[in-house]
Amino acid sequence: MRTTFTLTVITLLSILVSFGAGASTKEPFHPTSETVDYKCIFNHELLIICHNKTNSAAYIKSFIEKLKDTDVDAIMCCPTAWRTNLFPSEVDPTWEKYRPGQPLSKFRSYDYIMRYLHTGGDPVKETLEACRNSGKDFFISYRMNDHHYVDDLEWPCHNDFWRDHPEYWLGDSNTSPYTKKDNIRLFNYMLPQVRDHYFAIIQELCTNYDVDGVELDFQRFPKFFLQKDLKQGTAVMTAFVKRIRDLLDQLGRKRNKTLRLCIRVPETLAKCRKAGLDVPGWDVAKLIDMINVSSFYFHTMELDIEDFQANTKHAKIYGEMNYVTYQRKRPGPKFPFARRYTTLPIYYASALNLFARGADGLSLFNFDYIPRKQRLPMAEGLKRITDVEYLKTQSKDYVITRNFGSFPAHNEKTVHLIIPDDTKKITFKRALLRVETKADCTKVRLGVWLNGNQLKPCTPKTTTLFPPLAKNKAYVGPEMLQFYTVPLDALIAGENEVKISNPDPKKNGCTLYGMELALYR
């Protein structure tokens, strides 16, 4: 009876929404281009606005307004704090149960934002207004199976639909979603109740707000089916994506505008298939307009842009750049992670690399989750982030991080790296290569070759190639680093081969953990 009642409520609410129960959709609607011409999309997770004890529309809008004169042309607004919807939803009325003045939860940011909603605040509406005032198009980016804190049944940000329906989960254990096991508390998309709920939420958002498109965020979290159901689930997910496509087309006709459908998916087509996401099939059927090729959380250039381009014809391809290259857990609940934040030279190198490899545009994820004092100066660096000729004139840091194919590697590795810089046309002062190992490597003298030229070791004054945004324990000491001088004339404007080899692996074995190549202007 509970399942039938829930579906009936969702269906009725969807009907109300379809008749325009919400706000912010009065004509005239914001026009959109007939073609997909976005060059830089920016994921803006509204969780970030929840941490202020006293919130305001001005504070919420400031996150968008700082991007006004940058190359960012579309904001992908994630309207949730994990599973908590941060707008006055009728489909998910969990927020209505909060009572201002009730005892604070163990995650006080939840209480702060609930108070704000109960004073009439609407972070989605206010973000949309800031986008219009700043000349940015506005997308809803919805997380299709958020995984945060599913091992904690009492976490405040779980909504009622998740909390009240364990029968909709893939399993019921404290197992981490990062394992390959099925027994985890993520929704099972084989169940129509789950698909209907997500459709109703997206329909409500698209109807109540003048959106320019929707991004289905399949990277939070890319597991939707039991392994035994994957083949059938792939067809089920395709039907669900078509349902969203039809919704956007229907609303677009009513509003005399084109609503785009973007998907945020794993960085390889193989990983997409393992999650039941038939990206090439969706492209052939013209269900999608934009493909956001994502490395999930950590920054890397090892996105398989070429494979996506080769297997799609319709949708534009966006290469995602993340805010952190590495993080390490540390004791204490207040600051649980030490992070190496992505610097502007890393962004510039990745942007140039992605465009050279065929990406149609760039994507930025978690960009604002850097130390607060760094947000404005970092946003300044986005003013010409899509200008290829400008990027060629900037100092750059080409970073190959671990866990995306090349690293970690034991004792030796050959990496093929696209460096579009032509050092014969653009003058650089110098270039350095930095190799990081998992453990102390002082007894090892690695051999490093660039395009067949053996590089000479050197000892720079600092352990980082460029100043970090924050100094913390995520950065290793000199005992785990080796540096090499790179002759500028040895670089090729295109594909370069870097070979790293341990000459005596039996005596002093080492694990290679990452590589960076810096060009200095």
Image (cartoon, rainbow, N blue to C red):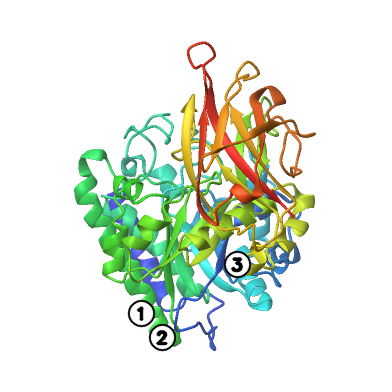
**Mark 1 = which residue?**
250
User: Considering the numbered disc 3 on the image, is that residue within a helix, a strand or a loop?
Assistant: helix
Classify mark 2: residues with Cα within 10 Å, few (<14), some (14-19) or many (20+): few
Of callouts 3 and 2, which one flags the residue occurring earlier in the amino acid sequence? Answer: 2
Above/below status of 411 relative to 454: above
Q: Rounded to the nearest whole Å, what is the CA distance between mark 3 and mark 2?
A: 38 Å
Classify mark 3: residues with Cα within 10 Å, few (<14), some (14-19) or many (20+): some
Disc sitting over residue 388 in the figure? 3
Of callouts 1 and 3, which one flags the residue occurring earlier in the amino acid sequence? Answer: 1
Residue 183 left/right relative to 507: left
Q: Position of residue 315 (x, y in %)?
A: 38, 69
Q: Residue at x 48, y 62 (%)?
A: 318
Quarter holding the C terminus? Answer: bottom right
Whether residues under marks 1 and 3 lie with C-beta atoms below 8 angstroms apart, the answer is no
Amino acid type, label 1: Gln
Pick the residue in front: 4 or 31: 31
Disc sitting over residue 254 in the figure? 2
Whether residues under marks 2 and 1 lie with C-beta atoms below 8 angstroms apart, the answer is yes
Q: Position of residue 153 (x, y in %)?
A: 48, 35
